[in-house]
Amino acid sequence: MPWFGEAQQAFGKETPYAEQQRLGSLERQVVGPLKRLAPASEVRLVIDALERLATGARDAVMEALNELAGFPFLRLIVTARPDTELARGGSRHPPHSCCSPSGECGPVS
C-alpha cells in the first residue's frame, strides 16, 4: 500500500514530537497514520502471535486493537494460541473466534 507510507510520513510531520513520545509503537506506526486515511477499498491488517507480547505491552496493544476494530474500512485479523488471555479479566476466546468492537465474541462463520 504505497499510500500508507505517505500517511506515516504525514503523521510524523504533523504530530508534535512530545505527543509522539507518549504513544506506543502500534499507535505511532499504525493507528495514527490509519486515522488520516479513508481508503476506497477494504484494508486487512494481520497481527500474528499475540501471545508473544511482553506482559507490560498487553494493555496498550489491546487498547490499540480495540481502536482499530472501530475503523469501518479495516478488517483486523489477529492470531494467538487458544489459551491466550485476550481481554482484561482473563477471558479466553475459542480458536477461530471473532470479537466485535463492543467485546462480544463468537465463532467465525
Image (cartoon, grey):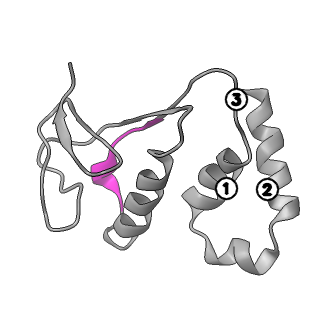
80 lies left or right of 7:
left
Q: Which residue is mark 2?
A: 11
The correct choice, above or below, for 34 with respect to 76 in the image is below
SS at mark 3 in the image? loop
User: Identity of the amino acid at label 1?
Assistant: Gly
Q: Residues within 10 Å of mark 3 (few under 14, many from 20)?
A: few
Task: Indicate which disc, 3 or 1, sits on the residue closer to the N terminus.
Answer: 1
Q: Which residue is mark 1?
A: 32
Q: Residues within 10 Å of mark 1 (few under 14, many from 20)?
A: many
The correct choice, above or below, for 91 with respect to 77 in the image is below
Whether pointer 2 and pointer 1 mark residues with C-beta atoms closer than 8 Å, the reply is yes
Task: Indicate which disc, 3 or 2, sits on the residue closer to the N terminus.
Answer: 2
Quarter-wise, where is residue 20 in the image? bottom right
Q: Which residue is mark 3?
A: 39
90 lies left or right of 87:
left
**In front here: 102 or 57?**
102
